[in-house]
Every structure is written in C-alpha cells, then in structure tokens.
Amino acid sequence: MRIISGRYRGLKLNEFAGNDIRPTADRVKESLFNILYDKVFGARVLDLFCGSGNLGIECLSRGAASVDFNDISPQSVKVLKGNLARLKGENVYTVTTGDYAAFLNNARGAYDLIFIDPPYALDVGLTALKIIAERSLLTDGGVAVYERDRPFEGTICGLEAYDERKYGKTYLTFFRPAKTEE
C-alpha cells in the first residue's frame, strides 16, 4: 500500500497483519482519485472508518487543507498514527478514536470529501450517510464516497447517488447533496 501522487508519492504505508482489516486496494484507490482529481486540493476531508489512513493520507499528499481521521479500533489508530508520524511538512489533521455515529453527531461544519469505508461485515454505511444528510455535513459541491462489496440500492433523503463504479469485488458509490426544489 503506497501513496500514489503528490508530495508523499511512493511512501509505503504501514499495514495490518492478517486479513481482519481490508484497506482500499491501490488499483481501486488510483481509480478513485482519478475521479476525484479536482476535488482534493484545498478540501476539508473526513476519513470516517480510516483504518491505516490510506485515503486520508493520499488527500494530504495531494494538498487537502485538512483531514479528520476517525476509527473505533485502537489498533487501527495506532497504525494510522505511525503512518502520520512519517509525513514531513505542514499537515493539518485530527485523529479521533470513537464510534462513527458519535463522531458525525458531534462534527462541526461541513466537509468537501467524506470517505465511508466500514468493514463490509458491518452494514453501517447507510446509517452514516443518513446522519451526513440529516446534519448537512457535505458542502454544496462536496462528495461522499461509500465503499462496499455490493451495489448501492435505495435512496438517502438529502443525498443523491450520482455515480457507481465496480472494481473487482469492490463498489464505489458517489453521493452529492440532493438538489432542493425551490
């Protein structure tokens, strides 16, 4: 697992032992950031189920203004902090260890990019999206990316699923704030 582009390009990130934690594959990450190329620089980013910090650190490398990392697992946060310690230069980020819903319910301000990549066995991504919509945590031009092992079905009041891509067994669904009728 490496940083693909930006000032930390080529930096190899620490990973987890075993198969319990599934980081976003480099191929999927490269495709994701090709889609988001114009959304990252200067963005306020949330890496909600951050694991090793793979996605959020890629954003820092590409010039994001700030990244908030959150994960409930102390093991994940330990790996994340080890990866963040290897970065050089000015980086604005916060690291929180806690439940995703508590984090979202206490978040201050909206984000330009939100990554939602929970463990596939836990079906909590929909709840996260609902909280994001209810609390207006996505800016007008913002994007939330939901990674999972199956296509997205249904609707989220306040968000519009405007694109979905499949990479092997991984699906990325892209959301933006729903347009309100005036």
Image: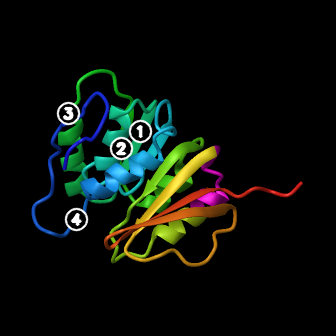
Q: Earlier in the sequence, mark 2 or mark 4?
A: 4
Return the disc, 1 or 3, that comes first in the chain's sequence.
Answer: 1
* Residue 69 magenta-highlighted: no
Q: Residue furthest top?
A: 89
In the rendered view, does 45 fall on the left or right side of 23?
A: right
Picture disc at residue 21? 4
Q: Which mark is residue 67?
A: 1
Above/below status of 99 relative to 6: below
The amino acid beneath tag 1 is: Val
**Residue at disc 4, secondary structure:** loop
Q: Residue at x 85, y 58 (%)?
A: 181
Outermost residue toward the left in this view: 17
Q: Which mark is residue 56?
A: 2
What is the CA distance from the residue labelled 2 to the residue labelled 1?
A: 6 Å
- Name which residue type carries label 2: Gly
Q: Which residues are magenta?
A: 131-140
**From mark 4 to mark 1, how far is it between C-alphas?**
21 Å
Marks 3/4 in contact by CB < 8 Å: the verdict is no
Whole-number angstrom distance, CA of label 3 to CA of label 4: 21 Å
Q: Earlier in the sequence, mark 2 or mark 1?
A: 2
Secondary element under disc 1, as helix, strand or loop, is strand
Measure how far apart labels 2 and 4 are at the Cα level.
16 Å
